[in-house]
Image: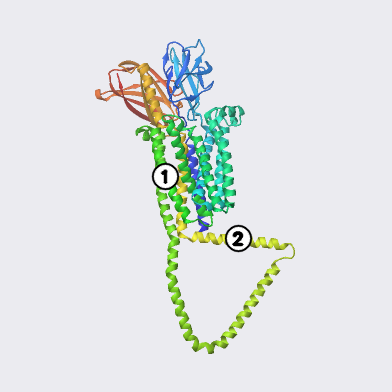
Amino acid sequence: MSQTIAPRVRTLLLLLLAVTGALLAGSAPVSAHAALTASDPQQGSVVKEAPAQVSLTFSEGVAMSDGSVRVLDPKGKRVDTGKTSEQGTNTYSVKLHSGLPDGTFTVTYQVVSADSHPVSGAFTFSIGAPSTTSVSVSDQEAGGGVVGWLYGFARYLSYAGFILLVGGAAFVLACWQRGTGERSVQRLVVSGWLSLTGATLAMLLLRGSYTGSGKVGDIFDLGLLSDVLQTKTGAALVSRLLLLAAGALFIAVLFGAYEKREDDEEKGDLTFGLAIGGFVVAAGLAATWAMAEHASTGIQTGISMPVDMLHLLAVAVWLGGLSTLLVALYRAPSIEPSAVRRFSRIAFGSVAVLAATGIYQSWRQLGSWSAFTGTSYGQLLLVKIGLVAVLVGIAWISRRWTARLSQAPAMKAAKTSAAAPVKAAAKTSAKASAKTSAAASAKASAKTSAATSEKSKESEDEDLETEEEKESAATPAGGGDGKRATQLARQRAAVATARDKRLRDADPLRSGLRRSVLAEAGVAVVLLAVTTVLTSTEPGRTVEEAEAATAASSQEATGALAVDIPFDTGGKDGKGLARVEIDPARVGGNDMHVYVQRPNGKAFDIPEVKVSFTLKAKDIGPLPVVPDRIATGHWTASGVQIPMAGNWAIAVTVRTSDIDQVTVDKNAQIG
């Protein structure tokens, strides 16, 4: 049985790593956490005179440096001064050179949101009249590419290391103090510390390139590293390293000095001290995430940061303790049922804390029921909730195995005590019967028994002599005694270990618990990957507020109508968003702009776009419009005639390749 378990475990782990890699690889297109809500000049607008500056307004505060905003003329030449300044709440501007020619200008920006994620994008405006432009905006998103993947993987390792470090130490201190002497448990906790430390160092090195150029060669740029250390995220990572130094001392005491204490009172005092010190270090580590990511921005930050810390600690105690229990069940010679029971109660409490803090976090990050299905954050959150439900279901099965395992020693003791009187009665009866029969056969068998006894003694003496001869022959003279003794000790230890493993594998209760805990750990690995992707996804509340602000700003400034229509042509790289802007959205002639974007907000270079208008209530249309392409992902048409006010169906036909095409529509009030 033991020979078949190991390959299954390895296969499961490889499968889980593959799923984790796929999830992390798919996380790159959704890294922005601040959205552009307004600009001056507006996206796609045509101004009569050249503006003195370009202003950008975001949904939350961003970190911006000189060069974060660039303005390019139709030939691709920079026309900004490169100096950015803050003009108001979440509004930033860059000055333009004087004497700009007419034509279409491109504005690109790359900043870092308040929750530490890079944000980039681009839009166009025109002076005098639209024109063709040679500017091609790259599809590479900030935080993407090889550097983005490496940074995402380091973030996953940091979460995993935190869980193993904190959860493993908590399991040993609170549930199984004898585990401080188990090598497998020691290796697990130390591996967590090493993973968290290595991932933190990697994130420090990657951070500058991750939020900037995205080039692999910039990873070891000391200038970028110096800039990172001056940011909120850099301070959080450095604080994490300092806390990990204290964590190393904690591990040394836990697995070194603690095991050597024999006095119960002294051991109790040390346990209390380790519990207080360990909690301080664990809470400090959790705070390094809370102070630099989602919890530090948005509404109710004074509440959300402590709640986020509780959430992380509860996850670590539950999943880290689960991992330690799995290692103990597979590697340790034995584990007391009482330790499993204690962990079961602690895990139940952790799940309760997770549920309470998770509900608050979901409300805070989503803000509406529609965001559950209408945003990427909500969809990922639904996946996470489903995985937690599966995990809780498997945990319920594990609790049943724990209860049966706890009852097993009592059942064995009861059977032993019930069988004792029967054995005693049988022994008394056997003695009485022996006395009755012995009188009749004693004389007849005396001679035979004596002869047999003599032969048996002789045989035993010969066997003992043979064993002694073998030992003396196998043991060389002089200094070979120590080597022989060491070899024999190793052989006996190996035999004893194999025998203990066979006994563990033969126990059906222990095997059942191991299987259920292994299944829990497998789901936990995938859950952790989804959580890592979720933390790098724009919250649903931010998405909806940004869309509302953009629409309100556009309508208030020009009275223009903006309609966003998602599409999917079904082919490779066929998903995107078509944004139709109609100005002034009244009866008569209108200017129309169509912006085709990828899911990550970048301009989508496609071969053809068509638009038509239909007023079904009056049986008018479809009225076809074929806009002209003026830039990558930007199409425009002038003099679009709307003959009557009403609820018009705006249909957009998008062709992404020679064979991949789709028509999508949306209703909007015009006039």
The scheme the figure's colours follow is rainbow
What's the CA distance linking mark 2 and mark 1? 41 Å
In this rendering, does residue 639 appear at all?
no
Q: What amino acid is found at the position of numbered circle 1 in the picture?
A: Val
N-term-proximal mark, 2 vs 1: 1
Q: Residue 196 placed where, x, y %?
A: 55, 40
Q: Quadrant of the C terminus?
A: top left
Q: Most extreme residue toward the right, as rendered? A: 478
Q: Do callouts 2 and 1 mark residues in contact (Cβ within 8 Å)? A: no
Q: Residues within 10 Å of mark 1 (few under 14, many from 20)?
A: some
Q: Nearer the viewer, residue 132 or 216?
A: 216
Disc sitting over residue 351 in the figure: 1
Quadrant in which residue 42 is drawn: top left
SS under mark 1: helix
Q: Residues within 10 Å of mark 2 (few under 14, many from 20)?
A: few
* Vertical placement of residue 502 versus 388, above or below: below
Q: Residue 150 placed where, x, y %?
A: 54, 36
* Vertical placement of residue 385 versus 30, above or below: below
| Residue at 47% from the left image edge and 45% from the top image edge | 317
86 left or right of 465? left
Q: Residue 625 placed where, x, y %?
A: 35, 21
Number of disc labels: 2
Q: What amino acid is found at the position of numbered circle 2 in the picture?
A: Ala
Q: Nearer the viewer, residue 329 or 408?
A: 408
Q: Most extreme residue toward the front, as rendered? A: 265
| Residue at 51% from the left image edge and 48% from the top image edge | 173
Disc sitting over residue 493 in the figure: 2
Quadrant in which residue 469 is drawn: bottom right
In this rendering, does residue 624 appear at all?
yes
